[in-house]
Image (cartoon, helix red, strand yellow):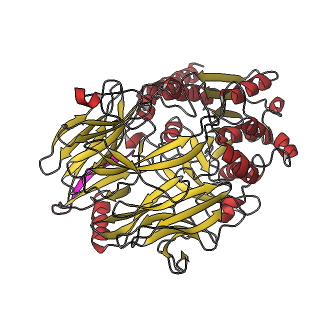
């Protein structure tokens, strides 16, 4: 009679010991603190590396490393702001702006400013105000200088990098509507602060520089049409290249300027058939060439060209994962050597504009490794680490990720990312279906992601489907999502979930749907349409009614532009008059009473993309019949969580919510 008790006691004791020996989970902060090392850029000659570094609770600063000696010095750091974007102006001088990672959108009351500094920290110059205020003045003479307005921003293009001059952009907005009117381009001297405006051929919305750093393309938008103008190198006269309708059922005749080659060739993105590819532009014919320079079988081109040393070396592009296609034989060999040193990782190489050194910058990452920056010496074959983005993350504690493809109910292929918990288990798991926002953009490609990896380390499989309407997967995939909010787009998410069940990966009794923005909308519609499939939902910053995106609200105006509401949304989302019945049938707000599952909702009090009234209206409606709804509001946040403390708080709440509803018993 005593033996069963003894066996039971031994079993319980062994279980307790096993539980005690279980390694601790990686802390939430390891995933959601700001990156400690968040950027690096070569000087044009490759002798120096500018880096942006920080630490929890500290401001991000800008430093410069001399690569030959490994010596470094800080060149800019402020007490009340973080270094934002930065570029080299030339081999001796850098330009940068600021941000504030310690406040949310609702507390922000300044522009980023614009500054220049020598690589040794001397010669610092403020070039643009921070919303009308002198943020920093190092000498009395600077106080009397007329600075550029706060809405002066750096270009993403690095320019010629061979003088003290740069080009900067200055958007102007309508005082009454807040709509973007035009984007001025200015040629700015970073030593004197003097600038001049470049005269455009039409009302400009965007500019493209050539490889000599000179403005060569202007994009102008009128109504639902987009025009491109080209500046002839021979006489510097502008001429119109083409005009296209922005939103139409077919764009096969259209193209988008991408970049210029060193020889003046204009490369454009265009579609011949189903997928976008890169083509050289034939100025004589006024159209892209017949054969593409770069194309992928299953994906649209998504990337940039790599030009250095007066040569087109290759292209960075993302398909199911990001990679580099090298045209240059030497760089192809360097890539092979780096890949051999760092197997199993994506290794993205960057080279200086006019290199005088053997150094190559390597940005390496994988599904279990956040981004790490290293310097590779092509002479010695050695790698030296420069910085880790998330040093607290241990790859051995992460879950592996794989790309999968499944078929929707109408046969449309749906790619998805599947991240599994650490340890190799892949059967009968609790699962979170994580829906990306947009919706007209691409979700994640293969690699470490804080949201999915955090959930995986907590024991959940994570499925991220690229439902129809997502971009980057061809015209058919994108176009088949038009006017399909809550309909075929939603069916794709359900079909992906059923695939995971059929594969034996997901436990059908323990599946939760989650997402932000459009993903929040899809979460709510998933609970409405498929109550037997999804046991709970987590949505943040989610749209709760399509009509509300058109009508806005007097208490807090949305930042969705009138242009998008007038020309884009009626085509891609639906017309509020013609499609009124569909809007009602696919409105979570109108069907809130049908949601009986546990639901976690979170919104930013200063969100202008999906204002707070979306969440408040829905919360009031759903709680009239559902007591299992939790509400979070971060007053200072906008469309997503900018502050680490709020990210840590939110995901801690998500962890507890999931454990209560679909976690292991």
Please indicate whether residue 243 sits to the left or right of residue 188 in the image.
Answer: right
> Which one is nearer the viewer's eye here, 143 or 357?
143
Q: From this view, report whether residue 234 is shown above or below residue 620.
A: below
Magenta residue span? 370-381
- Residue at the left extreme? 69
The image quadrant that residue 335 belongs to is: bottom left
Residue 405: % across, % down: 61, 60
| Residue at (39% x, 42% y) in the render | 396
The image quadrant that residue 175 belongs to is: top right
The image quadrant that residue 509 belongs to is: top right
| Residue at (78% x, 26% y) in the render | 622
Residue 319: % across, % down: 51, 61
| Residue at (78% x, 38% y) in the render | 547
Residue 112 in sight here: yes
Please indicate whether residue 81 sits to the left or right of residue 269 in the image.
Answer: left
Residue 36: % across, % down: 34, 35
Quadrant containing the N terminus in the rendered view: top right
Residue 276 in sight here: no
Residue 77: % across, % down: 28, 31
> Which one is nearer the viewer's eye here, 459 or 473?
473
Quadrant containing the C terminus in the rendered view: top right
Task: Look at the image and say whether residue 156 sits in the magenta stretch.
Answer: no
Q: From this view, report whether residue 198 is shown above or below residue 456.
A: below
> Which one is nearer the viewer's eye here, 618 or 102?
102
């Amino acid at each position: 009679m005593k033996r069963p008790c003894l066996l039971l006691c031994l079993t319980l004791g062994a279980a307790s010991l096993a539980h005690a020996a279980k390694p601790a989970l990686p802390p939430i902060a390891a995933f959601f603190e700001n990156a400690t090392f968040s950027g690096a850029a070569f000087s044009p000659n490759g002798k120096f590396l500018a880096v942006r570094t920080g630490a929890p609770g500290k401001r991000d600063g800008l430093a410069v490393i001399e690569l030959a000696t490994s010596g470094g010095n800080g060149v800019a750091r402020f007490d009340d702001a973080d270094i934002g974007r930065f570029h080299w102006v030339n081999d001796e001088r850098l330009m940068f702006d600021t941000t504030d990672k310690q406040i949310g959108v609702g507390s922000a009351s300044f522009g980023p400013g614009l500054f220049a500094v020598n690589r040794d920290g001397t010669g610092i110059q403020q070039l643009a105000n921070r919303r009308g205020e002198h943020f920093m003045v190092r000498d009395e003479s600077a106080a009397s200088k007329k600075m550029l307005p706060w809405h002066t921003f750096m270009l993403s293009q690095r320019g010629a990098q061979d003088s003290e001059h740069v080009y900067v952009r200055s958007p102007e907005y309508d005082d009454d509507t807040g709509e973007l009117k035009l984007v001025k381009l200015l040629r700015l001297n970073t030593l004197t602060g003097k600038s001049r405006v470049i005269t455009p051929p039409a009302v400009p919305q965007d500019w493209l520089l050539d490889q000599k750093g000179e403005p060569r393309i202007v994009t102008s938008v009128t109504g639902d049409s987009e025009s491109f103008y080209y500046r002839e190198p021979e006489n510097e006269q502008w001429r119109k290249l083409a005009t296209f309708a922005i939103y139409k059922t077919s764009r096969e005749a259209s193209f988008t300027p991408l970049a210029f080659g060193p020889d003046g060739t204009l490369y454009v993105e265009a579609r011949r058939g189903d997928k976008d590819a890169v083509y050289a532009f034939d100025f004589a014919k006024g159209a892209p060439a017949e054969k593409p320079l770069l194309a992928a079988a299953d994906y649209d081109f998504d990337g940039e060209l790599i030009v250095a040393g007066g040569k087109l070396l290759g292209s960075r592009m993302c398909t199911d994962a990001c990679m580099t296609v090298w045209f240059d034989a030497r760089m192809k060999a360097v890539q092979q050597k780096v890949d051999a040193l760092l197997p199993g990782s994506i290794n993205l190489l960057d080279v200086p504009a006019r290199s005088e050194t053997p150094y190559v910058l390597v940005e390496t990452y994988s599904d279990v490794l956040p981004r790490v920056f290293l310097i590779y010496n092509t002479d010695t074959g050695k790698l030296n680490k420069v910085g880790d983005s998330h040093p607290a993350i241990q790859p051995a504690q992460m879950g592996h990720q794989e790309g999968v493809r499944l078929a929707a109910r109408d046969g449309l292929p749906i790619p998805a990312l599947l991240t599994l918990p650490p340890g190799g288990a892949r059967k009968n798991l609790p699962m979170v279906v994580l829906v990306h926002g947009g919706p007209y953009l691409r979700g994640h490609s293969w690699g470490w992601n804080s949201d999915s990896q955090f959930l995986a380390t907590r024991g959940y499989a994570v499925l991220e489907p690229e439902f129809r309407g997502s971009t980057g997967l061809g015209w058919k995939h994108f176009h088949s999502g038009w006017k399909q909010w809550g309909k075929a787009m939603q069916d794709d998410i359900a079909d992906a979930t059923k695939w995971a069940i059929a594969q034996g990966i997901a436990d059908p009794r323990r599946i939760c749907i989650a997402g932000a923005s459009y993903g929040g909308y899809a979460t709510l519609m998933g609970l409405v349409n498929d109550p037997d499939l999804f046991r709970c939902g987590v949505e943040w910053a989610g749209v709760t009614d399509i009509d509300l995106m058109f009508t806005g609200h007097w208490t807090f105006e949305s930042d969705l532009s009138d242009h998008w509401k007038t020309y884009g949304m009626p085509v891609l989302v639906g017309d509020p008059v013609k499609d009124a019945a569909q809007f009602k049938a696919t409105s979570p707000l109108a069907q809130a009473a049908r949601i009986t599952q546990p639901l976690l909702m979170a919104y930013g009090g200063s969100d202008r993309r999906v204002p707070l009234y979306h969440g408040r209206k829905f919360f009031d409606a759903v709680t009239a019949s559902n007591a299992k709804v939790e509400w979070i509001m971060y007053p200072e946040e906008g469309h997503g969580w900018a502050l680490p403390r709020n990210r840590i708080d939110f995901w801690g709440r998500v962890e507890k919510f999931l454990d209560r509803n679909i976690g292991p018993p």
